[in-house]
Amino acid sequence: MLTDQSVQKLVADVLEIDVCDVGVNKSFYVDLDMDSLHKAEFIVALERACGAEFDPADAAAMDSVNDVMRLLRNRHQVS
């Protein structure tokens, strides 16, 4: 089961930054300089970590760790 900390770690690994720099409310694009290739890599890592696939609309809506966690809660992937 994924936690906000594990999602932060995925983001940090993809962006090759310190996990402490990935706040739960920080925008992937504005605050963390994620580009489309990073985003694709992150989505693949997230899908592997939670064993689910995300449609393009869901993936596009993910712009922060909180967005990811909200989507996962809505899909019952986390409590």
Image (cartoon, helix red, strand yellow):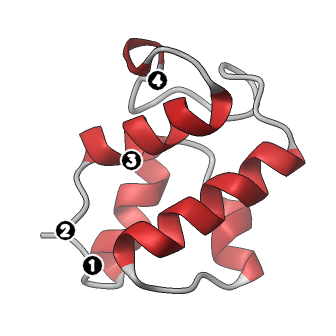
The local secondary structure at tag 4 comes to loop
Decide which of tag 3 and tag 4 comes sooner along the chain: 3
- Residue at (35, 58) in percent of width and height: 69
Give the CA separation, mark 3 to mark 1: 13 Å
Type of the residue with mark 1 = Gln
| Of the pair 23 and 17, the residue shown nearer to us | 17
Decide which of tag 3 and tag 2 comes sooner along the chain: 2
Give the CA separation, mark 2 to mark 4: 19 Å
In the drawing, what numbered circle is on residue 22?
4
- Of tags 2 and 1, which is closer to the observer? 2
Q: Quadrant of residue 54?
A: bottom right
Estimate how packed mark 3 is, as few (under 14), some (14 to 19) or many (20 or more) residues with alpha carbons within 10 Å: many
- Residue at which label 1 appears: 77
- Residue at which label 3 appears: 7
Decide which of tag 1 and tag 4 comes sooner along the chain: 4
Whether residue 26 is situated above or below residue 48 in the rendered picture? above
